[in-house]
Image (cartoon, rainbow, N blue to C red):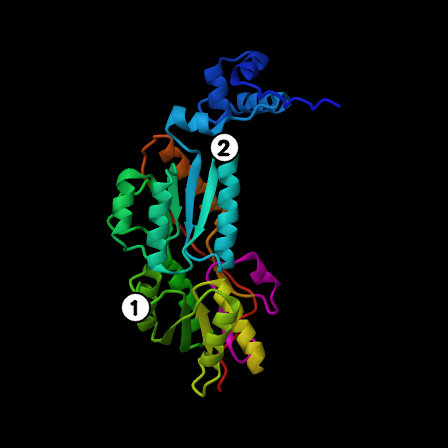
């Protein structure tokens, strides 16, 4: 039998003829720009019926854009950051953009290398949840590339936008809650390394603990479950065990739960545990993890809106401050005499 000929790619002019619009209007609709939602839906439906697919190379050559947005995550071992990456990738796809997701693995040097690689690959914009917000590289990148930061502001960088966590309020909420339960000796587990000691949350937790009269021990713990369980076992296995652990990531808190189980300690009777990002799994633990919620859906919407607008040349720099909310469950109990 003769081999069937490959189907010819439908053109944008054919989509325009099918919808009664100009090719320019169809192009805008396919990119979700400058036309009504009704027109966007009508054009996309016609394109799907005709089998139209945009030629990415031709579009990039014509527009000077790749349609790619870089997403540089601090550590994808952190389950909350995994959820963030998934949400941003899906939201960008809805805007006819594609996410190029890279993992800094908590390493400032790796973060700098990957950021340069994304710039060299000509991404249209960069979203970063920085490991080292004070790195001089961010100011250099922001001169030539729309950069949107999530979590912490980038020092001296004129970014396209920021979705900044109100860490002062978040830390205060957590520590005041623990103090209200009678806790005075608190271990603070943070993914921050000694090479990046000036992250706002870590700086504020020390000052706020002093204000509240708390005795804190700040310990570096990775996001990975096995590694953070090991750190937590060393912390909780000694004679001078704290009465509570405040973790700057729910993923780290899961390691404290695992360590408590390994050591035969009951949560919250013998060790209270508190998280800081309210991952959906936290409500499934027994007992559920008390945590600080940052509205991940709102963060995704804001970051994508800012980076897409900047990539399209709408230079309206905005700083969005994300407010925290305490989610009380059962992992923090009253401090009991040892």
- Residue found 48% across the figure and 59% down from its top: 78
192 to 157, vertically: above or below: below
Q: Which residue is mark 2?
A: 96
Task: Measure the C-alpha gap from mark 1 to mark 2.
Answer: 45 Å
Q: Which residues are magenta?
A: 267-288
Note whether 201 is above or below 179 in the view shown.
above
Residue 260: percent from left, percent from top: 54, 77
**SS assignment at label 1:** helix
Pick the front one: 264 or 165: 264
Closest to the observer, 54 or 193? 54
Vertical relation: 317 (above or below) 4: below
Q: Nearer the viewer, residue 186 or 257?
A: 257
Q: Could you tell whether 229 is left or right of 187 in the image?
A: right
Q: Report the residue at 27% width, 54% height from top.
A: 135
Picture quadrant of residue 67: top left
Dot 2: element: loop
Q: Is residue 248 left or right of residue 135?
A: right
The label on residue 223 is none
Name the residue rendered at 37%, 65% in the picture.
192
The kind of secondary structure the magenta stretch mainly shows is: loop
* Res. 220 image quadrant: bottom left
- Is residue 199 visible in the rendered structure shown here? yes
State the residue at coordinates (60%, 69%).
Answer: 287
Mark sitting earlier along the chain (1/2) = 2
In the rendering, at what x and y percent does residue 108 appear? 34, 59
Position in image of residue 307 (x %, y %)? 39, 38
Task: Tell whether label 2 touches label 1 (CB within 8 Å).
Answer: no
Is residue 319 visible to us here? Answer: no
Q: Which residue is mark 1?
A: 207
* Quadrant for the N terminus in the image: top right
């Amino acid at each position: 039998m003769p081999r069937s000929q490959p189907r010819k790619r439908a053109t944008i002019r054919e989509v325009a003829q099918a919808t009664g619009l100009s090719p320019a209007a169809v192009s805008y609709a396919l990119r979700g720009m400058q036309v009504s939602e009704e027109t966007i839906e009508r054009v996309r439906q016609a394109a799907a019926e005709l089998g139209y697919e945009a030629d990415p190379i031709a579009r990039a050559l014509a527009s000077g854009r790749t349609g790619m947005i870089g997403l540089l995550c601090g550590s994808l071992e952190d389950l909350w950051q995994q959820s963030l990456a998934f949400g941003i990738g899906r939201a960008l796809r809805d805007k006819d953009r594609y996410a190029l997701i890279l993992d800094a693995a908590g390493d400032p040097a790796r973060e700098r290398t990957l950021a340069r690689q994304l710039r060299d690959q000509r991404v249209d914009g960069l979203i970063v949840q920085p490991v080292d917000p004070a790195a001089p590289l961010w100011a250099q990148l922001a001169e030539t590339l729309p950069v949107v930061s999530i979590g912490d502001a980038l020092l001296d960088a004129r970014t396209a936008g920021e979705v900044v966590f109100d860490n002062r309020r978040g830390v205060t909420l957590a520590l005041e809650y623990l103090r209200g339960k009678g806790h005075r000796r608190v271990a603070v587990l943070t993914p921050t390394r000694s090479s990046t000691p000036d992250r706002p949350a870590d700086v504020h937790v020390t000052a706020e603990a002093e204000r509240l009269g708390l005795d804190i021990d700040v310990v570096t713990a990775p996001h990975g479950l096995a590694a953070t369980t090991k750190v937590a076992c060393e912390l909780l296995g000694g004679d001078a065990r704290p009465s509570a652990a405040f973790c700057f990531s729910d993923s780290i808190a899961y390691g404290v739960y695992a360590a408590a189980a390994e050591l035969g300690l009951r949560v919250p009777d013998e060790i209270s545990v508190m998280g800081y990002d309210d991952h959906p799994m936290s409500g499934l633990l027994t007992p559920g993890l008390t945590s600080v919620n940052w509205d991940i859906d709102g963060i995704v919407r804001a970051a994508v809106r800012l980076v897409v607008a900047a990539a399209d040349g709408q230079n309206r720099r905005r700083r969005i401050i994300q407010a925290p909310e305490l989610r009380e469950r059962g992992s923090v109990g009253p401090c009991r005499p040892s």
